[in-house]
Amino acid sequence: MLKSKNLVETNKYELEIEVSAEAFEEAIQSVYLKNKSKITVAGFRPGKAPRKIIEKEYGEGVFYEDAVNALYGPAVEEAVKEAELTLVAAPDAEVTDVSKENGVKFKVTCITKPVVDIKDYKGIKVTKTVNAVTDEQVEHEIGHRLEKASRTVSIDDRACQNGDLVVIDFEGFKDGVPFDGGKAEKFSLKLGSGQFIPGFEDQVVGHSIGDEFDINVTFPEDYQEKSLAGAPVVFKIKLHEISVTELPELDDDFVKDTTDFNTVDELRADIRKNLEEAASKQADSQVETDILEAVISKLEGEIPEVMYENKVNEMIDDLSHRLSHQGIKLETYLSFTGMTMESLRTTYLEQATKQVKLRLALEKIAELENIVPSDEDIEKEFETIAQQYQMSVENVKQYLRAEDISLDTAVGKAAELVKESAVIE
């Protein structure tokens, strides 16, 4: 039972919990019955030794630890409920006393959901800016379409030059010794793409099919493989193929063959229209972002750091889950990107902070506006989730509580209220 509840600092409470001697005795007896078959005592068959004999042989407290562990969860859960606390992290517990005569005493430190406030969340003023579509953007899109319709043509009557696609064998040597990862055969490389370290592609330019030659380069000082950083190396190259990309001519025939339009002017007009629609949608998205950023800035309250840490953990778990579907481990991803777990957490922290603050702000707005989703709203949300994950509604309800769905729905309605009341200039 809860003996005392003390606020030790903002969002942190200390609870003193007592479990009666009777309850402790029941837990000890339960542990004894569960484990007696595993305990050997001379003169008794396995599982037949009385509890008093086992306690005499192994000590009175032989079952204490397991009994305390069995009592801890239910006792803390009941005490937190009695104290009317909403926790944002697992409580930190300390056993302060254990005895058959007095039972068990716990001291539990709890980090609680912060009390926050928010004002002036209606009528937020934001500016909508739709960027004008330029001729360069239209031509850039046309260039993409030409590239999609391009063809690759082999070249054998000249040396290669920037922009060509070449097929090469290469092997790298440091101090005359091959290094790991420095060898490949029939590797396709577009010269001038910057795919390789500086100086490599420039030294391929000017060579012809069948040429075998050396390239001398130095790895950058900040190269992620430390054994090669700043090191001069030699690559032995053999050039197998040279090819170029030929773009089709932009004319009415090309337009008729590849689109539903008849002329280049019609195609340009359609591309401009699509780009303008995309620019408008982007502006709408930015307006929504600006409104929600303003909501975050209006939140008042001291938020426990653990809430940000928990959100970062969720984001990393989500990344790990998505990578696993591609057959990639998180550790492998970090290696490929040159990141550490610490730098990944730092990358996610700003986004996590915003998400936590926005959620708290919208929950408070829902409370202030007395937004209470109807049973129909909650059922509709269950159906949406079921469709999203291709599950039955009944199965979804086994994993998600109606109370949580109700709060999520209320938060969504609060966000809509804020956006609908905003003044867009």
Image (cartoon, grey):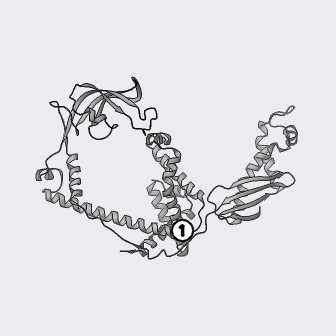
Mark 1 surroundings: few (<14), some (14-19) or many (≥20) residues within 10 A:
many
Q: Nearer the viewer, residue 178 or 167?
A: 178
Name the amino acid, label 1: Glu
Q: Please state, as top left, top right, bottom left or bottom right, where the C terminus lies in the image.
A: bottom left
- Report the side of 401 relative to 322 (left or right): right
Horizontal and vertical percent position of residue 319:
48, 48
Q: Quadrant of the N terminus?
A: bottom right
Q: In the rendered view, does 228 fall on the left or right side of 246?
A: right
Which residue corresponds to the image point at 48% horizontal and 51% vertical from the top-left? 347
Residue that badge 1 annotates: 363
Residue 386 horizontal/vertical position (percent)? 47, 57
Q: Position of residue 57 (x, y in %)?
A: 86, 37
SS assignment at label 1: helix
How many circles with numbers are drawn on the protein?
1
Is 370 placed left or right of 227 in the picture?
Answer: right
Q: Can the viewer see residue 97 in this picture?
A: yes
Residue drawn at 33 percent across, 64 percent down? 281
Residue 310 appears left or right of 3: left
From where the camera sits, is residue 377 visible? no
Point out residue 144 in the picture as x, y percentages from the top left corner: 23, 50
In which quadrant of the rendered view does residue 86 lie? bottom right
Question: Against 126, is 107 above or below?
Answer: above
Tell me the residue at 23%/25% (across/down).
211
